[in-house]
Image (tube, helix red, strand yellow):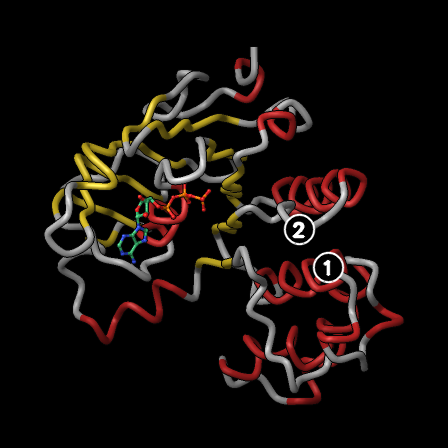
Amino acid sequence: MSDAEGSIVQFTNVGLRYGSDREVLSDISFTLYPGSFYFLTGASGAGKTSLLRLLYLAQRPSRGMISMFGEDAITLPREELPALRRRIGVVFQDFRLVEHLSTFDNVALPLRLAGMSEGKLAKPVDDMLNWVGLGHRADAKPATLSGGEQQRVAIARAVIARPRILVADEPTGNVDPEMAVKLLRLFEALNRLGTTVVVATHDVHLLRKVPDSLIMRLDKGTLSDPTGALRYPPRREAVGA
Ligand SMILES: Nc1ncnc2c1ncn2[C@@H]1O[C@H](COP(=O)(O)OP(=O)(O)OP(=O)(O)O)[C@@H](O)[C@H]1O
């Protein structure tokens, strides 16, 4: 399979079924380009989480082809998947913070797993906590943080190792509208630094808050492309028009 020029992810006729049930995703084809900001939208049950799980390689499709960073993600040997996954940051719907670890240690986790020394990781973790506005909560355990604070820890942890893609599943689902906009601004700032961002949301009001974003819409497992730019390198000035 050859990659569309310059793309970092390419799905071709991907289908997914759980067990012997009918397909929950059918004929999904799209291309993600570096530095773009995508919303994945659709009603509850449309298949957003399932599509994101394929995207961050937590789930193999039942059919079709997935290419990531120029590698065939379907036939890649299992032992090579972690290296591919490290290039993808994930913000889960339910945060999945480690309860017994402090804010600092949750955010430091990906760097420690990558083998970075304690001396080296302190500054980037402190900088990241300040960036998400949680410098003063470094020692707090997740249970003592508000929903918005926990979400920001989850975002900080997802981006600390500078992933090429950030995937976020309903990141604003558990916060008030004001915090939702603040979180989106964090994603936009990250996107301006060159990270491709994919945010799943059922909240159509959010889409308008990021004028340059591209929209993928799922309806009962089928993808549509209202901004018309998924298959071709998006021209930023044409996006959102
Ligand atoms: N592990 C699973 N086993 C069987 N069916 C599943 C599984 N996960 C999801 N489904 C089904 O797949 C369909 C799509 O679910 P999915 O969670 O991907 O949708 P969604 O758009 O993310 O929904 P929501 O916004 O409510 O989270 C649903 O019908 C769901 O019941």
Q: Is 60 situated above or below 170?
A: below
**Horizontal relation, residue 23 to residue 212: left or right:** left
Where is residue 6 drawn, in percent x and y? 36, 36
Amino acid at dot 2: Asn
The first of marks 1 and 2 along the sequence is 1
- Name which residue lies at 39% across and 36% down: 32
Disc 2 on helix, strand or loop? Answer: loop
Quadrant of res 7 = top left
Which residue lies under the disc numbered 2? Answer: 174
Q: Is 133 situated above or below 224?
A: below
Along the viewing direction, whichever of 84 and 51 lies nearer the viewer: 51
- Marks 1 and 2 in Cβ contact (< 8 Å): yes
Residue 147 is marked as 1
- Name which residue lies at 28% across and 29% down: 222
- Name which residue lies at 24% across and 54% down: 71
Tell me if the residue at label 2 has its CB under 8 Å from ligand 1.
Answer: no
Where is residue 44 drawn, in percent x and y? 44, 38
Disc 1 on helix, strand or loop? Answer: helix
**Horizontal relation, residue 236 to residue 29: left or right:** right
